[in-house]
């Protein structure tokens, strides 16, 4: 079966109001598809307005593992859904390394966000050291098992995986299409055969220096269902061309 392709921008802690307005003035995708953006939370409202006219859905880069209450500075998944968000990232490598988010916390966030009705893009990936030690599959397997254990059956369809080798994020180094395809195939098989997911339906995104010059080759791999893109998604021309590439291969 063929799955349609996704293009998800992760703007991290970038963009001003002026830059966002210019982005939505200039972005031109030209067809409908799964085109998503995750801005800083303070910019979600602005992006919801801008995205509506351009067929771009909006989500968060992170959310709380609590629904509501006395959690100063946190971002509620139910509030995100209520505000119009479609998804949240969970477990981006920058949250894992800088904010020291552990798999148990990531699992709680995933459970709560899915229960709230958001789609979750759950990020996994190995460091360069782990890859060089031949541990890529072991690391991914552990992150999947510890982070996704016991998800309710009914929520599994709302889970998306992003394979993001840490050594390729923001470095300009992209995993080769062959390296990425191998990891994606492993993820699909492991979740399908050992963790009760519908492997054929599961969406698995690749992230790590995706740009217009490498996107077509990556998206042509049978197990790569789209991109999770940082740097290139900030530029309207590049994001437009990434989305058009995804639409073409859908
Ligand atoms: C990311 O932020 O998830 C990412 C993959 O960044 P970049 O595309 O800049 O490597």
Image: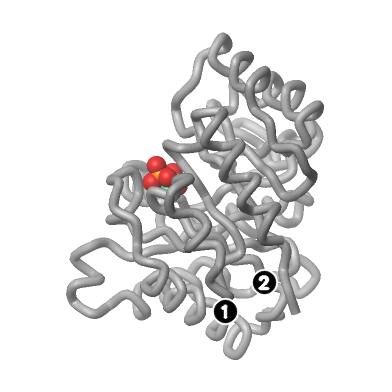
Residue 52 seen in the figure: yes
Q: Position of residue 165 (x, y in %)?
A: 36, 60
Q: Is residue 223 left or right of residue 29?
A: left
Answer yes or no: disc 2 within 8 Å of ligand 1.
no
> Mark 1 or mark 2, which has the lower sequence index?
1
Label 2 CA crowd tier, 10 Å (few <14, some 14–19, many 20+): many
Checking the image for residue 188, the label placed there is 1
Seen as rendered, the residue at the extreme top is: 18
Q: Nearer the viewer, residue 204 or 197?
A: 204
Per the image, the residue denoted by label 2 is: 202
Pick the quarter of the image with the N terminus.
Answer: bottom right
Q: Position of residue 249 (x, y in %)?
A: 66, 61
Decide: is 199 above or below 238.
below
Kindly check if marks 1 and 2 are in contact, taking CB atoms under 8 A apart as contact.
yes
Decide: is 155 above or below 214.
below
Pick the quarter of the image with the C terminus.
Answer: bottom right
Q: Position of residue 36 (x, y in %)?
A: 66, 42
Q: Nearer the viewer, residue 167 or 120?
A: 167
Q: Is residue 139 left or right of residue 89?
A: left
Secondary structure at badge 1 equals: helix
């Amino acid at each position: 079966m063929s799955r349609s392709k996704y293009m998800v921008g992760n703007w991290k802690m970038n963009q001003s109001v002026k830059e966002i307005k210019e982005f939505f003035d200039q972005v031109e995708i030209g067809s409908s598809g799964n085109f998503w953006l995750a801005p800083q939370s303070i910019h979600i409202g602005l992006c919801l307005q801008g995205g509506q006219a351009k067929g771009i859905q909006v989500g968060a880069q992170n959310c709380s593992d609590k629904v509501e209450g006395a959690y100063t500075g946190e971002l509620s998944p139910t509030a995100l859904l209520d505000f119009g968000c479609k998804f949240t990232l969970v477990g981006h490598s920058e949250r894992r390394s800088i904010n020291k988010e552990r798999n148990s916390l990531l699992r709680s966030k995933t459970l709560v966000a899915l229960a709230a009705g958001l789609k979750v893009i759950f990020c996994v990936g190995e460091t360069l050291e782990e890859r060089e030690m031949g541990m890529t599959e072991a690391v991914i397997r552990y992150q999947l098992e510890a982070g996704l254990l016991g998800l309710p059956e009914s929520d599994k369809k709302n889970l998306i995986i992003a394979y993001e080798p840490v050594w390729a994020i923001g470095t300009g180094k992209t995993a080769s299409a062959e390296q990425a395809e191998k990891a994606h195939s492993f993820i699909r098989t492991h979740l399908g055969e050992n963790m009760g997911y519908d492997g054929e339906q599961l969406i698995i995104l690749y992230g790590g220096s995706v740009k217009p010059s490498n996107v077509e080759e990556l998206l042509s791999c049978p197990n790569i269902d789209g991109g999770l893109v940082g740097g290139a998604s900030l530029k309207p021309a590049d994001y437009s061309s990434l989305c058009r590439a995804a639409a073409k291969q859908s």
